[in-house]
């Protein structure tokens, strides 16, 4: 099978350079990839219905006998119409209409029974089907595949190419899933699965094929993920001898919540175990993850090792640097900052201090990943807001040193299914408690006619000494979307006594830092910004989050943005401004107004968007799933994970003859991600 991935698609008949590009667009540049381009749906010809049973608005197969093919008539605009009278077994008439197709007279003969596939509509009391496709009874395709299409490449053409590709499967094909596993989970063979998924006889056989392919997909993915992790697992870890948590909590200006204590204790226990820690801390926005990260760094550093914390944006790295310094410097811990925006000289100095151990804690962005960042004795790697990083980036940091502990923090609450999928064998701590004194953020959705009222509301808070964010989707003026620069100017004119700042991703890192510093220092009252402030930013005095064109954003993103306020003890507000009428956008706003719980929102998000998008490879750096469905295939996922663990325990490099097929599939899947 793997060898077919080396065969370019142009080896198929009728696929030239031009068409190959279209296949490439669908993700099928090779014959092998084409076989893995599964139908997205099927036309079901396997159980035709009667005329009266036919559903409205969806195409279906109807069994009927031709009674009369009438002579062609022409409409005034010159279209040739041929009407065909048929009736089903119950005698219900069905009229077929064909356009500009004189061959029909030769193809359909009176008195013969056919299966017609199309949409049954009612036209002046008559049941009709326009331009159905059809086949003689007994010569029907069963389920006819419908492929993901692109312009210039219709499903039928793809189906024909797939049929040709199936012929190229080698006679003696090795099944990548060992026989014993197939038997254990009642899975069919690969050849049968491929032939059937592309050309099933009926629903049942399609399901059998799908089950096998979904299992295989999840197994390969799990093997890949576990292999990446085991690189850190194999090595014995640096052992933390004792917990310094009590000492650390005293350094804080507040009392930690029970959930913060618990999460930190779990992490420290991991680091005392002798095995490398591999833990995810999930906590809703504002739950106080930074303090937990700081607690872990503190214990590691007091135990004589270095720690590093990686954040996804410059802004966040600066903020963490400031707050970690404030917490840890009083304990005599030296903290450094490394981002892409430092001058080469400054960078070199930080790197030297990290290499010789002068610095004990390093905070930074992905600039930390360059090979010339070398630690003297790295004990702990923390990634904040990890969903912003690809899998590769996460592991790259952990590999800087042997036996390091890994802690990842995420505010994107991930439903259990997805967590298991993405993190495999990661241990999970949940911070399910907010610091005391927080009031629930009030959320409103308004249309733009009420914008002025909302701004007066914000102004009132500014006069009371509070601050606000206003989020705009665009940077420059020019389209119909609110733009940061224009908006900030207009706002300054409308509210002359408020200090207004503008922030967006195209500004130089230095400028961004300055603006953020002014905002957190209270020198800016209202910050007009793009979504660069989406994750992590913490200015507790800000109480209003006003989001323009709110329909632009997904639920999780809206929740993140809203999480920028409500971080102090004042009542905070989130105001969504949108004129969108479409139902899906309205549904999202509704959810936002109804619930503040990040986990509930994530579940709704998953439902509204479907796992494909939620789990898009861009977000997590993982390959997209082609056939497995995380909503339905949870038990399949668990089985695949069990098998993957067993296999890797017995044969970590997957070298056994029985495992080589899978190893090839793992390589194929991850090669696009730059993994070997
Ligand atoms: P997130 O989980 O979103 O990363 P942060 O770590 O940024 O949250 O914390 C949010 C705010 O809550 C910060 O201003 C922090 O100082 C404050 N905070 C954290 N823990 C507590 C606590 N136990 N009591 C009071 N305030 C806290
Ligand atoms: Mg945070």
Image (spheres, rainbow, N blue to C red):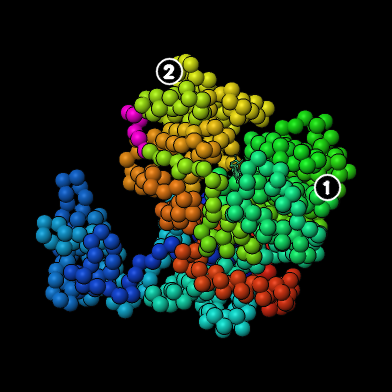
* Residue 133 image-quadrant placement: bottom left
Q: Is residue 11 above or below residue 249?
A: below
Segment tinted magenta in the rendering? 445-450
Q: Residue furthest right?
A: 356
Residue at numbered disc 2: 494
x, y percentage for residue 433?
Answer: 54, 52
CA distance separating discs 2 and 1? 52 Å
User: Quick check: marks 2 and 1 in contact, CB under 8 Å?
Assistant: no
Judge left or right: residue 492 versus residue 259: left
Q: Nearer the viewer, residue 609 or 241?
A: 241
Which residue occupies 52% across, 43% down? Answer: 437
Q: Residue at x 38, y 71 (%)?
A: 143
Circle 2 crowding by C-alpha within 10 Å: few under 14, some 14–19, many from 20 = few
- Quadrant of the drawing holding the N terminus: bottom right
Using a 10 Å C-alpha cutoff, classify the residue at mark 1 as few (fewer than 14 neighbours), some (14 to 19) or many (20 or more).
many
Residue 277: mark in rendering: none
- Residue farthest left in this picture: 125
Q: Is residue 476 visible?
A: no
Q: Is residue 661 located in the magenta-colored stretch of the structure? A: no
| Residue 245 at least partly seen | yes
**Res 375 label:** 1
The residue positioned 22% from the left and 76% from the top of the image is 112
- For the point 30% across and 75% down, the residue is 47
Q: Is residue 96 left or right of residue 608?
A: left
Position of residue 474 measured from the top left corner of the image (x, y, whole percent)? 49, 31
Q: Quadrant of residue 447?
A: top left
Asked if 365 appears above or below 149 in the picture, the reply is above
Disc 2 on helix, strand or loop? Answer: helix
């Amino acid at each position: 099978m793997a060898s077919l991935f080396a065969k370019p698609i142009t080896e198929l008949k009728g696929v030239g350079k031009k068409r190959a590009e279209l296949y490439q667009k669908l993700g099928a540049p090779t014959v092998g990839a084409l076989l893995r381009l599964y139908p997205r749906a099927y036309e079901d010809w396997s159980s035709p219905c009667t005329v009266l049973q036919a559903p409205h608005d969806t195409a279906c197969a109807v069994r009927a006998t031709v009674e009369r093919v009438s002579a062609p008539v022409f409409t005034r605009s010159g279209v040739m119409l041929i009407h065909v009278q048929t009736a089903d077994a119950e005698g219900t008439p069905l009229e077929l209409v064909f356009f500009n197709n004189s061959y029909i007279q030769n193809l359909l003969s009176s008195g013969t029974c056919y299966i017609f596939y199309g949409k049954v509509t009612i036209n002046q009391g008559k049941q009709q089907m326009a331009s159905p496709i059809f086949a003689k009874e007994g010569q029907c395709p069963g389920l006819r595949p419908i492929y993901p299409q692109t312009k210039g490449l219709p499903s039928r053409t793809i189906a024909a190419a797939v049929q040709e590709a199936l012929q190229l499967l080698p006679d003696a094909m090795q099944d990548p899933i060992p026989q014993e596993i197939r038997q254990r989970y009642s899975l069919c063979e690969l050849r049968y699965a491929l032939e059937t998924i592309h050309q099933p006889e009926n629903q049942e056989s399609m399901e059998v094929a799908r089950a096998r392919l979904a299992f295989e997909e999840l197994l390969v993915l799990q093997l890949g993920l576990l292999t990446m992790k085991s690189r850190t697992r194999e090595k014995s870890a640096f052992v933390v001898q004792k917990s310094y948590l009590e000492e650390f909590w005293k350094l804080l200006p507040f009392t930690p919540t029970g959930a913060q204590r618990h999460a930190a204790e779990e992490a420290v226990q991991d680091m005392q175990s002798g095995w490398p820690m591999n833990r995810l801390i999930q906590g809703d926005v504002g739950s106080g993850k930074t303090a937990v990260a700081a607690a872990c760094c503190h214990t590691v550093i007091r135990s004589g090792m270095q720690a590093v914390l990686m954040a996804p944006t410059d802004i966040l790295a600066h903020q963490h640097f400031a707050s970690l310094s404030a917490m840890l410097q009083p304990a005599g811990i030296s903290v450094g900052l490394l981002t892409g925006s430092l001058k080469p000289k400054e960078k070199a100095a930080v790197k030297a201090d990290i290499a010789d151990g002068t610095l004990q804690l390093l905070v930074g962005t992905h600039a930390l990943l360059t090979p010339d960042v070398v630690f003297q004795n790295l004990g702990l790697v923390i990634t904040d807001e990890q969903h912003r990083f690809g899998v590769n980036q996460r592991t790259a940091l952990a590999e800087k040193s042997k036996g390091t502990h890994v802690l990842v923090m995420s505010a994107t609450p991930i439903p259990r299914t997805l967590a298991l999928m993405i993190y495999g064998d990661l241990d999970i701590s949940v911070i399910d408690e907010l610091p005391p004194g927080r009031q629930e953020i009030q959320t409103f959705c308004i249309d733009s006619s009420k914008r002025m009222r909302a701004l007066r509301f914000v102004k009132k808070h500014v006069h009371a000494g509070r601050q606000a964010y206003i989020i705009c989707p665009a940077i420059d003026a020019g389209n119909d979307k609110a733009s940061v620069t224009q908006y900030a100017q207009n706002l300054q004119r409308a509210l002359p006594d408020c200090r207004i700042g503008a922030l967006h991703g195209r500004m130089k890192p230095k400028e961004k830092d300055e603006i953020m510093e002014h905002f957190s220092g209270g020198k800016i009252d209202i910050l007009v910004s793009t979504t660069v402030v989406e994750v992590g930013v913490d200015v507790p005095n800000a109480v209003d989050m006003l989001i323009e064109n709110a329909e632009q954003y997904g639920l999780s993103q809206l929740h993140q943005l809203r999480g920028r306020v409500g971080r102090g003890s004042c009542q905070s507000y989130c105001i969504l401004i949108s004129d969108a009428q479409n139902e899906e956008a309205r549904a999202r706003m509704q959810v936002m107004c109804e619930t503040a719980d990040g986990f509930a929102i994530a579940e709704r998000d998953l439902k509204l968007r479907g796992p494909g998008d939620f789990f898009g490879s861009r977000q997590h750096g993982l390959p997209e799933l082609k056939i497995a469905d995380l909503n339905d295939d949870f038990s399949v996922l668990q089985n695949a994970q069990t098998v993957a663990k067993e296999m890797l325990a017995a044969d970590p490099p997957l070298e056994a003859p029985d495992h080589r097929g899978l190893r090839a599939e793992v390589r194929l899947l991850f090669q696009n991600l730059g993994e070997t």
